[in-house]
Image (spheres, helix red, strand yellow):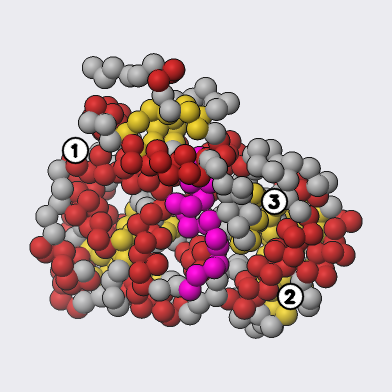
Amino acid sequence: MVICPSVASRPVFSSRAVTALFLERQHLARPRAARLTPRRLCRFVEDVGGLQMDSINVLDRAHYLTVWSRFGPYDRRHLDGLVYRRRLLFEYWAHAACLVPTAALPWWRRAMLDYRGRNTGWSSWLRRNAKVVSRVREAVTANGPMANADFEGRRPAGGGGWWDWKPVQHALHHLWMTGAFAIHSRRHFQKHYDLLERALPDAHACEPVSREEFQRWHVERSLHGMGAATELDLAWYLTFPRHQGTARRAALRSMLERGEITEIEVAGSSARWLALTRDLPALATAGRRHAPSRGTTLLAPFDSLLWYRNRVTRLFGFDYRIEVYTPGPKRVHGYYTLPILHDGRLIGRVDAKAHRVERKLEIRHVHLEPWFAQGLTPPCGWGSVDRDEGLAGLGEALRSLAVFVGADAVKLVRVTPRRLRAPMARAIPS
């Protein structure tokens, strides 16, 4: 049984300190201030735990946008080369589908092996389709990288959900999740699968860690990425493997006993907060900063800073929901809105669309938070933000985004509140 320290003996930190360290770990302390290099890319993904991927392309793919948020415009081919040729990162499931560090393969190998034996809902399907799985594996072994389209077959009639994937697509996904296959490359964002040991040549020599080591590592990586967290934050940050509550709590007890994790108190919060013991000095330093970060950027909806929306609300006073699955008439802010981060505060959101043929970036709606528009103190507790500086920073970020998506012109359509449209337009010359 773990004897928890009394509340009075716990180190006390401000929510400002937690927010500042969170931004630092997310590589948003000085966004777009450094050029993308292999070392910086690896450090970024190691720190946050994963770079989420998504197929929506109204502006750009999510992982490309997330890297732009930190490093500004860069050549996507350079990033693709670091992933699919140099193999510094590989695709697996971390929060959702993510790019994760190849250096973490021994830990993710454990997750792959355990996936085979867990009750993941595959059992009955595998019994019915064992021959399909075997044929898919034999085909990739013989032919090298293959995509779903390389196999013949049709989707079952009458359905459109993931459960109606044609059997080959199910087989490819299962073989990937269990570590038999890896994603070798993508062409037009379509996955091409190969044997894990061919896609990642060092995989055959990679000994998976134990289950206990994996759970401790999983907790450590999550706490590192957030700086400090509640138990709910931990559950909703790196969400794969799923249904690991009992194992996560056991890992927490073990790490508390060993002194690797310390219970802390966050002023104004009644929740139980946790931090890596080694991070206590960093939290103390973060709490003394004048501002949590410096600079302006836009965040993709699947950015790791936003993985757990309730945490974002608690720390930033910013209620964010992605509305791509909301019927058009019911949307409040737009289809694919990007939160605006300025000097560590979330001051609004931008609904944008790239018109590639016309080489135009359309800013459909800039919706600024009421406190920012009125020149008030933000709800997150940091000092007030100069509105003119915030608008100028947003304008510069949008011009940078236009360069990144290959747009020669920026068209501003709508600003809320409307009285800020003219100063916003001056900040984004079309």
Q: Are the residues tagged 1 and 2 within 8 Å (C-beta)? A: no
Instruction: Tell me the kind of residue under disc 2.
Output: Val
Is residue 19 part of the magenta span, yes or no?
A: yes
**Regarding mark 1 in the picture, which secondary structure is present there?**
helix
Q: Position of residue 10 (x, y in %)?
A: 41, 24
On the rendered structure, is 376 left or right of 119? right
Instruction: Tell me the kind of residue under disc 1.
Output: Glu
- Label 2 and label 3: CA atoms lie apart by 21 Å
Which residue occupies 40% across, 73% down? Answer: 37
Residue 410, quarter of the rendered image: bottom right
Numbered circle sitting on residue 410: 2
| Residue at numbered disc 1 | 212
Which residue occupies 25% across, 56% down? Answer: 104
**Regarding mark 2 in the picture, which secondary structure is present there?**
strand
Q: Quadrant of the N terminus?
A: top left
Instruction: Of the two numbered discs 3 and 1 on the same chain, state the one appearing first in sequence.
Output: 1
Q: Give the label, 3 or 1, closer to the camera.
A: 3
Instruction: Of the two numbered discs 2 and 3 on the same chain, state the one appearing first in sequence.
Output: 3
Q: Is residue 317 visible?
A: no
- Label 3 and label 1: CA atoms lie apart by 41 Å
Q: Is residue 20 visible?
A: yes
Which residue occupies 78% across, 69% down? Answer: 427
On the rendered structure, is 416 left or right of 322? right
